[in-house]
Amino acid sequence: MKIRARFEKLEEVKYLSHLELIRLFRRAFRRAGLPLAYSRGFNPHVLLSLGPPLKVGMIGRNEYFDLELSDEIRIDSFISSVNRELPEGLRILEAVSIPEGTKPLMAVINTAVYIFDMTLRERIQSEEKMLEKFLSENRIIVTRHRRNKEDIEIDIRPLIFAGELIEPGKWKFQVKCSSQGNLRPEELGAALADYYTEVEFVPVVNIQREGLYIKIGAELYIPSDDMVIGELR
Amino acid sequence: MDLAAKLDEVLYQVSNPVRYIGNEWNIIKKEWNKEKIKIALAFPDLYEIGMSHLGLKILYHLLNMEEDIICERTYAPWHDMEELMRNEGIPLFSLENKKAVNEFDVFGFTLQYEMSYTNVINMLDLACLPIYSKDRGEKHPLVIGGGSSIYNPEPLAPFFDLFFIGEAETGIVDLMRRYRELKDKKIPKEDILFELSRLPGVYVPGLYKADYRDGGKVVSINPVRDGVKEKIRRQVVRDLDQAFYPTKFLVPYMDIVHDRAVIEIARGCTRSCRFCAAGMSYRPVRERSKETIIKLADEILQNTGYEELSLSSLSTIDYSDITELVKSLSRRYQDRKISISLPSLRVDRFSVNLAKEVQRVRKSGLTFAPEAGTQRLRDVINKGVAEEELYDAVRAAFEAGWSTIKLYFMLGLPTETIEDLDGIVQLAHKVLEIGREIRRNRKINMKQVQVNVSVSTFVPKPFTPFQWVEMISREEIEERQQYLRNRLKRKGIVFSWNDPDLSLLEGVFSRGDRRLAPVLESAWKKGARFDGWNESFSMENWQESFSENRIEMSEYLRKREPDEILPWDHINMGVSKKFLQKEYERALKGELTGDCRSAGCTGCNICFELDAVMELIGGEKDENQGKI
């Protein structure tokens, strides 16, 4: 059976990298005694796949993984037995059984929502207006750093779907997050600091990923939504 | 300052922040209170190195089993983290409760490698402690050291309050409690140290005075007051089978160097390789029973979720009934896809076949250590490997599908000549040819054959038969490395070697004495840290430090006279000096010495000296064996 799980990755484990998180899950599953399914070949590994990586230092409120098991298991006992084996800061919130043939997380997720904790040097204009002005730009150019390659300039404006002020100092952005285009939240942070002299550099620890979505038209669906998984369930 | 909150805020600025967060699975985080005795255990290298060290984990769990003791860990911060700590005023802290190390009663280091000594000093400084023992008082934590590189603790002596000589499981808990008792009496540090020096295995360097003469010779090392033991006897575990072994191992988040479940199936080795410090100083051989090993393995795998189990020992294949042990473990964990790994292989077909049977994962390569290029030199070092055995072993490995073979050799061994270097070259070429021929004749695909030839420079170590020999000079090392480099330039052979300067420094400190302490201090002040890491190492720092202190490295690399007092003579390792002397003479004559497990007593004297016995129980049949 295949399971899609929604989990949170909070303060205590925010400094774990994507690979470290995968390793942690594998070992937690073993300790939990799950009927794990393995890949074939010389080096069999647990059939686990995670959604888009979370930047080291950033917390994630609603993250996802898919796991394949060799046997049926009740969803509630899956959640409780795994949660017993997870460290503080990491917890499965929900899990659903998904049918064979469900598209993988990385193929369907196309949107992420981030919340920025902004530090403003001075409040000379309303934050609402600031955000509005920022979003009214046609082009927002940032420098993208690439591993082992030269830096390039990119326009991130098309990658920002929406922005919203949720309370003073907390700015929420809905951005593109997929293999066909991805906005790195730290780039958005840099753009904000660049654009406004009032805005201080936003360190990665002041950004959180509220969730990952599949945007269809104007609607946002979470990856464990029936709509996404299909009628087979 | 709330260190935990502070760290949480700033750690994103450093590389691999996960090194500094703690919170690993099975971490033991006890409630911090005044009554408890607190010890911070330190490994003076990066987290991923320190977390791979078994000894420290044994002590961590052993100490934390005691209700009245809190044991927490700390590792050396990498350059970027040190800079951040110094800028932000963050002191060296423990990973568990995030407490400053100077809030602990005891600060204990495990010392495994001479080139981490500057990290020790740096960690003392980051802990806001005066680096020298004499400058620390009753309010400071007691700074203690143990581990395999302090069988000659002398270069570090002035920095430490005391050392524990030998296997610390035997005495660390008593030492902690005794210290707390004395500390609560509010007596002067000097008296506390004197009292502690009466405990078995405890060496308080400040209670001994060493006199030196120009040219680096020791005139005498004597106790400074009555009632101080003349020699410090190494402590060993008796009945390893019943000895404490943790099962709730810490599981790191980071991909550490040895990231797997580890069972110490035996301790000690009696093969008597004459260059090997571990082989001499972990005697006698003690094995755990198969039943104990299986029971421990079950618990460890359940508690950690590890996918690999390593059977650790200085010489794993020498375990009495290794075949049966490996087979039963392999069968037991087959369904769970857990692979068994054998960290040290003997150079023979038997080892390869065993490795082939259990290693579910075909690792990139297999490693063999012939150590020297010719039979003559292998006899000198008492490495009982015949050339044919090596070829047989690599043939078996290639046939089993391994395509990369790693060969370990040493350069600069006593009596080495050009023929011995040619021997290394010939062996490497022959192994490559064997591999290529097998590849040609195989029907199924096999990767290109590669032979990695790793040649390190021999460093004479204390408590070995070669403790008297001269280490070869920088020029000779370079010349011989160049000679090999020129002859190992061939597709399919990858030659690697060590930085000569690093080997020479290791040579200086391993047979060093207390006069080297100011050199360490100078080098540290000039920025020396992580000297074992290429990107950090600067020989200029060291050269300046030696000359500032008017010390010639050559004083420490020279040949020692048979009747000379050695800086470590007051440490009783168990193996007698006479035996080492005799072994040295036999080496020069190319005479072999057998393994006392099979060839009878070789007279090393360890069993008498330490009141210990060989424990060869791995081969015993158990009535329950059929059930496993």
Image (cartoon, coloured by chain):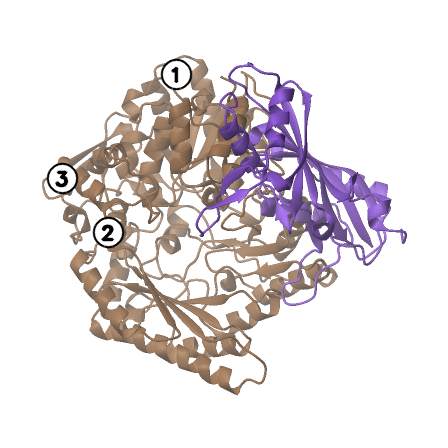
Q: Nearer the viewer, residue B624 or B398?
A: B398
Side of B569 relative to B355 (left or right) = left
Q: Residue at x 55, y 67 (%)?
A: B355
Q: Give the mark nearer the N terminus: 2 vs 1.
A: 1
Residue type at tag 1: Lys
Q: Nearer the viewer, mark 1 or mark 3?
A: 3
> Decide: marks 2, 3 in contact (CB < 8 A)?
no
Density class for disc 2 (Cα within 10 Å; few <14, some 14-19, many ≥20) is some
| Residue B341 at x, y percent in the picture | 56, 60
Q: Nearer the viewer, mark 2 or mark 1?
A: 2
Q: Secondary structure at mark 2?
A: helix
Q: Which chain is brown?
A: B
Reading the image, the residue beneath label 2 is: B501
| Residue B592 at x, y percent in the picture | 32, 69
Total numbered circles: 3
Q: Chain of mark 1?
A: B
Q: Colour of chain A?
A: purple
Reading the image, the residue beneath label 3 is: B547
Q: Residue at x 46, y 75 (%)?
A: B449
Q: Give the mark nearer the N terminus: 1 vs 3.
A: 1
Report the residue that reaches farthest toward the left: B214
Q: CA distance from mark 2 to mark 1?
A: 40 Å
Report the residue that reaches farthest toward the bottom: B441
Q: Secondary structure at mark 1?
A: loop
Q: Nearer the viewer, residue B223 or A197?
A: A197
Q: Quadrant of residue B310?
A: bottom right
